[in-house]
Amino acid sequence: MRTVMTKPWDATSEHLLRELAPQVLGAVARRFRDFSSAEDAVQEAMIAAFTRWPGEGIPDNPRGWLIQVATRRMTDQVRSEIARRERETVVASETDIVLPTVEIESDMDPDDTLILLFMCCHPALTSSSAIALTLRAVGGLTTAEIANAFLVPEATMAQRISRAKQNIRTSGVPFRLPAPVEHAERLPAVLHVLYLIFNEGYASSIGAHLQRLDLAREAIRLTRGAKALLPDDAEVTGLLALMLLTNARRAARTGPDEELVPLDKQNRTLWDRAEISEGSELLTAALSKGSVGLYQLQAAIAAVHDEASRAEDTDWPQILALYELLKRVAPSPMVTLNHAIAVAMVHGPSKGLELLRTLDTDARLSGHYRLDAVRAHLLEMVGDYESAVKHYRIAASRTTSIPERNYLMTQAARLAERRLG
């Protein structure tokens, strides 16, 4: 394949490589049906791109270039393995070797990333391991970011991902494109992955930026692909609705210096009304199917927030009712945390603080900054500024997001000044 190097390397080129990585891995893994080796080959292709493209320019077909380099690496590995196994009995050049073609466009799928998503949700893995592996392969999340999503230490998550790869390698179950009948079996894990990728894009858990727009947009794009694949599934539709109804607030979530702006202080005229309209229509369609699930309920909560033209117009009793239903459908410490906020808004902050105390002994959330941040907010609402300052500072010390840390420290400083005044 001839490549023409014309496009210069610039600040957006690294984003391009991150976007292409899961697509290339999907194509190579689908072709060779060996995830671990394909991942290594794609990593080498990425290193080659980082080395060559700044000086030579970006190829006209960067995805094809990366697939070709990774495919050649895989082909060399297959030849080497066959030669190693048959070295003593057969001359390697005489061996009947059948290798995938290196012609790039002949068997390209229109969306190898979506295929990779379903492939990674492998039957040899537990749901949590499949989700963790897929977040690395498809979402490009770091081990630390995935650990944050799962509320576990980074070292624990690193071991989980390593075991997932080993289990695929030793299971004997081929790493291949799942048949249509398998889509439904793997769908819960696929949707959870998309949900977590979107969450990391909408509210980045690590680093200097509050949002990672590339991740959020990719999650929405892939969820649209999943909906096209399974148009009658209410939870796929509900997840897409949730993403759109949440993403609609993106422009109002940060100030001029990328500082965090909380929901009740946002300029709601900046919300994307087209996304809200599309999300609301999708939610209505999903709810009409009769079976209400996790993502539909979360989308319904997001819709109630989006319907309020002012923060004080928010229908908190309806949100509270939805959280109570969500606690029955899909209980989790984060749902309980958000439920406590809704309780505080309807029945008063003291009732919300009572609910928070039930989370103090939950190993999944104890030590998580959000528990302290919510407690600080509710303590501020009851007028206990000294305790609120303490918990704002504890929360700030525990978050790995710089914008969130800055916001929490600002809140602590504001209340400390009020106490002195």
Image (tube, helix red, strand yellow):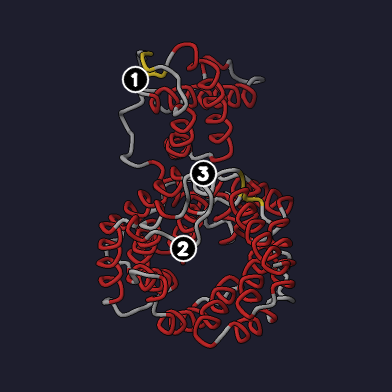
Which label sits on residue 257?
3
Q: Earlier in the sequence, mark 2 or mark 1?
A: 1
User: Is 78 left, or right, of 250 in this rendering?
Assistant: right
Placement of the N terminus among the 4 image quadrants: top left
Distance between the alpha carbons at the discs numbered 2 and 1: 45 Å
Q: Nearer the viewer, mark 2 or mark 1?
A: 2
User: In the image shown, does 358 or 156 lie closer to the viewer?
Assistant: 358
Q: Earlier in the sequence, mark 3 or mark 1?
A: 1
- The residue labelled by disc 1 is 60
Secondary structure found at label 3: loop
Res. 349 visible in picture = yes
Q: Provide residue 101's location: percent of width, then percent of height.
A: 39, 25
Secondary structure found at label 2: helix
How dense is the environment of label 3, judged by Cα within 10 Å: few (below 14), some, or many (20 and up)? few
| Residue occupying image coordinates x 59% and y 48% | 168
Secondary structure found at label 1: loop
- The residue labelled by disc 2 is 265
Determine the image quadrant of residue 23: top left
Q: Provide residue 90's location: percent of width, then percent of height.
A: 59, 19
Specify the amino acid type for callout 2. Lys
Which label sits on residue 145?
none
User: In the image shown, does 87 or 63 lie closer to the viewer?
Assistant: 63
Placement of the C terminus among the 4 image quadrants: bottom right
Is 403 situated above or below 13? Answer: below
